Image (cartoon, rainbow, N blue to C red):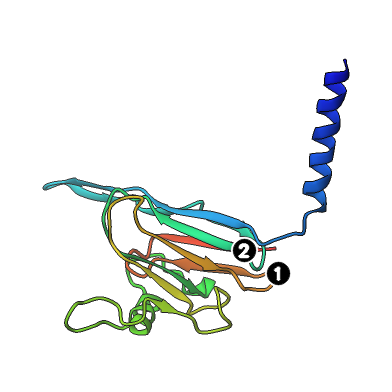
Amino acid sequence: MPRRITVLLVAVAGLCLVAAAPATAATKRLRIVGGLDFKPGKSVKDTQRFAPGVLTVDSGDRVVLRNRSKVQDPHTISVVRRRALPNSFECPACDAIFEAHGEDPNTGEPVNPVVDVGDPGFDRPGDSIFIPPGPPGKKKVIFRVSADEGDNLSYLCGIHPWMQGRLRVR
């Protein structure tokens, strides 16, 4: 019986320490998942997407975006106005994303891998990060969400405009 009481007291003390610890920004996880199904003479099906589609974050949180897609494509995560999200392959917002990142004529690589138009961090349309191609799970980017509480940031991949999502800031 005394051992149970000791274990209980240690557990309660540990909970009190955790509850008393100062609040710090959390790290949230976002992934690029899916792949490509190619049937010669029949069809192409690209299932690449952001997961989860809607991620709830606090202002100040860090987001780790890891490319877990089966395809070794480059991507962007680019904040756009909700009404600019395309519902077809035509994507005027994507043209602006490519222009903002620029392209090195010798390598084809983006001149500006990170485009930050507002305050530092993800907070407004125009913010964009380039994710280079690479083996599944090996490429990741980390960014801080600096948008105000109550904001909803719609985003897409400028290269694959059907890849869309939303950051809900609380």
Q: Residue at x 42, y 55 (%)?
A: 66
Q: Quadrant of residue 115?
A: bottom left
Question: x%, y% of residue 75?
Answer: 34, 64
Q: Dot 2 corresponds to which residue? A: 61
- Nearest to the eye among marks 2 and 1: give it: 2
Q: Residue at x 77, y 59 (%)?
A: 22
- Front one among 22 and 105: 22
Q: Residue at x 42, y 72 (%)?
A: 129
For the C terminus, the quadrant is bottom right
Q: Is residue 10 above or below residue 123?
A: above
The local secondary structure at tag 2 comes to: loop
For the N terminus, the quadrant is top right
Q: Is residue 130 above or below residue 138?
A: below
Q: Dot 1 corresponds to which residue? A: 149
The local secondary structure at tag 1 comes to: loop
Q: Amino acid at mark 1?
A: Glu
Spatial CA distance of label 2 from label 1 is 11 Å
Taking the view exactly as shown, the residue that stands out farthest to the left is 41
